[in-house]
Amino acid sequence: MWILLVAVYAATLGVPAQPGLDYAGNEPHHLLAAESLVSDRDVDLTDEYAARSYAAWYPQNLTTDGRVVGGRLVEPHGVGFAVLITPAYALGGARAVQWQMIAMLALAFVLAAALARRMVPEPWATVGVGLVALSPPAVAASTTVTPGVAAAVLLSGAALCALAVRERPRRRYVAIGALLLAGLPWLGWSYLAPGVVVAWALVVWTLRERRRFAALVAGEALAGSLVFYATVNDRFYGGITPRSASTAALPDTPLEYLERVPRVVGVWLDRDVGLLRWAPLIALAFFAAWLLYRSRRDQLARVAPARREAEATAGLLLAMIGAQLVVTALLAAGPLRAGNAFAGVSMVAVLPALAALSAWGVRHVPRPVAAVLALLTLGGTAWLLWLTDIPGWLEVDSDAPWGPVVGVFPAFVTFNWWALVACALLAVGVGVLVWRERRAAGEWRRAAAASRTSKALH
């Protein structure tokens, strides 16, 4: 699977970010930070901008998005990801870094297949994950120089370790999981939210298995990493996160955050950047959430003990996705479509988790439904890459994979009534579903109570 994904991803190396630019958005800033570490072994970018050290891979004039702190020009992208890509950059420049991203994202989906096997048997696990791994968002992210790719590996690996501790409490699983999670904040503050979810599961499940010393060591490692992270950032960036050096501002009032709530839906359904618009198969992750709810409501784990592992895996993955969604939709600076990445790249850290849940959905939906969603997803990738000549990932103007039906998807970039109606319809649908399930659960409890009373009387 890893070899197949690397081969497919490598075939897209020739697709630029924009016409005439192989790298755009935040990519040049990450690469310039690696250049600074290779040439000067520091995080001060003053001399790199003065000497145009980026000219070899960015022909235009690059403007900093940071500020001067303590006499050093620093940018809000942090040093952790730059340190990670520095060896590859030193060996082969920017192109070698893209190869590193390809290898890491392919590894993340291999780990996702291992997660999926805790919920469904083969071939469903590999097939479901593989289909999402070949979707347009995954293919676009594979050659994007972004810390989200590395975060996907760390989160998937840590989730596997946490679930392994729940099944077989071994110190090595606790240690590896803690080390993986300790690296997350260094890639970006936005990955702390899903990392906290996995860390909580790792520590709680370790304590549940009476491994108190191992849980203590894991907690200390995570806390120590956070303290060191905040100390370094305060020294170099003037705050507890590198974002302190950013010129972009977050909303100031609760009302401004409230205005961002529709973006939670836009991440999935927006006409240009919605994940479901580009990868319809991911809709099965929502069906997997429904399967989890029904499984717990009907207490299937009592009848089939193996179901308990599937429930634990699905619950952990859903919590990770929810945490990352909140950060991406509500706390990320700039509009939903900032123009610095292809659709889905902002959620790439949990894309393997979505793939694993989709595999569970593929196993339980009718096969024609799964086949249609798979064809739409793979057809979108083929349409985008090989049936059309796209000028660049950030310049995609395509109806793939829906054709004229794509106009049904609302646009969340500006205020419009269709986006509000779509959000209202979704809210009403969820409300009706919750009401029906609560009513059904109440009837089930009353019937069970009546049955127990009848048995007691007889």
Image (cartoon, rainbow, N blue to C red):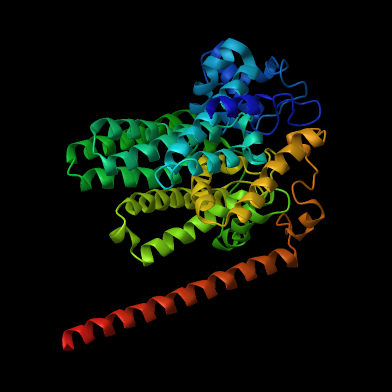
Q: Is residue 69 above or below residue 115?
A: above
Which residue reaches farthest bottom?
457
* Res. 96 image quadrant: top right
Coordinates of residue 272 in the picture (x, y in percent): 73, 49
Coordinates of residue 81 in the picture (x, y in percent): 52, 27
Coordinates of residue 233 in the picture (x, y in percent): 45, 32
Q: Is residue 254 above or below residue 182?
A: below
The reply to whether residue 449 is visible in this rendering is: yes
Q: Locate residue 316 relative to residue 347 in the image: left or right.
A: left
Residue drawn at 60 percent across, 21 percent down: 99
Q: Is residue 168 above or below residue 267?
A: above
Count the labels in the image: 0
Coordinates of residue 61 in the picture (x, y in percent): 76, 24
Q: Quadrant of the C terminus?
A: bottom left
Q: Is residue 296 above or below residue 379?
A: below
Residue drawn at 53 percent across, 24 percent down: 82
* Res. 32 image quadrant: top right
Which of 239 and 194 lies nearest the eye of the viewer? Answer: 194
Residue drawn at 24 percent across, 34 percent down: 170
Which of 221 and 311 lies nearest the eye of the viewer? Answer: 311
The reply to whether residue 251 is visible in this rendering is: no
Residue drawn at 22 percent across, 45 percent down: 207
